[in-house]
Amino acid sequence: MEKLLNLLADGHFHSGEELGDSLGVSRAAVWKKLKGLEELGLILDSVRGKGYRLGRGIELLDQSKIESGLDKSLLNRIKLHTCFSTGSTNDLVKELSDDESGSMTFCLAEHQTSGRGRRGRTWVSPFGSTISMSANWRISEGTASLEGLSLAVGLAVLKALEANGARNIELKWPNDVLWQGRKLSGILLEVHGDPTGECDVIIGIGINIKLSEDQKKGIGQPAVDLHEVCGKTVSRNAVVSQLINTLSHTLDGFTHGGFALYRDQWSEYDAFRGQEVNIEAAGRKEKGVNVGVNEQGGLLIKTETGVKVFNGGEVSLRKS
Ligand code: ATP
C-alpha cells in the first residue's frame, strides 16, 4: 500500500494497468489496495479511461528530506522514525526509545488510529493531512522541574510554524496554537517513570497541514490548517525539520533556565491577554480577566476576589 501511495502522491491520474505493472501485481490486487487507501480516509478520484488519482495530492513523510532540514548540530543527537500508521505516536515513541543511546527519539506517523488529546479526548489525524509527531525527552530531576514545559513547547511549535510562513498565530494557555480563534495545533505531554527522579517526558504534537472541509467539520471545535493560514501549500517535511530544530533548542534552553526564559516571548503571543475569560478547573467555574502567566507557566486571572493562579492539567480556558 505504501508503494501504491508513493505512485499516487503526485496527484496525477494513473491507470490500473500502469499501477499493476509498477507494483508487479494484478489489476484486481491494485483495486483491493485502492479500497484499502479509501478506508484510511484518503479521497480517490476514479475516471473511466484515465484511471485513479489522489484528489488533492499528498506530500508523504520523507526521512531524508526531514534530515536535510535539520540543524547540523542535531544530526548525532536524535533518532528519527517515520511510519505509515500507528495507534498513537505518543505510545510508539515510548516503545521505541532506547534506554542506552542517550539520543532523543522522534516518531512520526502518516496516520494515527487513536490519536488523543487531554483527558482522553480524541485528536483527529487523517492520513497524510497533519503532522503527528512525538518525542521522548529523558530527565533526571523529577516532575517538579517540568513547570511551564508545556507552554515552552507551544512556543517552539509556534516558532516552527512562523518559520514556514504562518503569520498572526497565537497561543492559548497552556499550549494550543490558534489562528483567528481556530485551532491549528495541539500538544499532549505525558510523563512516565519516577516523579521525583528519572522520568520520560513524552511530548506529542499535532499540527493540521491540509484537511478537507468535511474533516474540519468533524472536529468538535473550530479548526484550521496551515494551508489556509499561509494561503498556499506548505511542505510537511520542511515543517517537521523546523519543528525538531525549534523543539530541541527550546528543551536545551529549558534545561538551563526553565520557563522563565520564555515567559516574555510567550506573553507576546497570548491570544487572550487582557481579555475576559471563563475558567473551568476540577468542576469549578471562574470568570475574570487574563492578566498573563507567571515564571512557572501558571495562568493569572484577576477575579473579584483578587488574582488567582491556575496551573495545567485539569484547567480549561475559554474566551467569555
Ligand atoms: P481545553 O478544553 O482544556 O482548552 P481542548 O478542548 O483544546 O482543551 P485538548 O485535549 O487540548 O482539548 O485537545 C482535544 C480537542 O481538540 C478535541 O476534543 C477536539 O475538540 C479538538 N481537536 C481534535 N482534533 C483536532 C485537530 N486535528 N485540529 C484541531 N482541533 C482538534
Image (cartoon, rainbow, N blue to C red):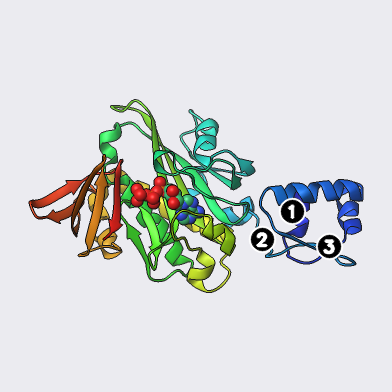
The amino acid type of the residue labelled 3 equals His
Q: Which residue is mark 2?
A: 58
Give 216 or 22, whichever is nearer the viewer.
216
Q: Position of residue 68 (x, y in %)?
A: 58, 57
The amino acid type of the residue labelled 1 equals Leu
Distance from disc 1 to disc 2, alpha carbons, whole Å, reads 9 Å
Q: Earlier in the sequence, mark 1 or mark 2?
A: 1
Which residue of the protein is positioned furthest toward the left in this rendering?
305
Q: Position of residue 1 (x, y in %)?
A: 76, 46
Residue at (50, 54) in percent of width and height: 219
Residue at (43, 66) in percent of width and height: 162
Q: Is residue 81 left or right of residue 183?
A: right
Give 136 or 120, whichever is nearer the viewer.
120
Task: Tell me the tag on residue 5.
Answer: 1
Q: Vertical placement of 26 versus 8: above or below?
A: above
The amino acid type of the residue labelled 2 equals Ile
Tell me the element at label 3. Answer: loop
Residue at (59, 52) in percent of width and height: 126
Residue at (34, 25) in percent of width and height: 194
Q: Which residue is mark 3?
A: 14
Q: How many marks?
A: 3
Look at the image and tell me whether residue 206 can be seen: no
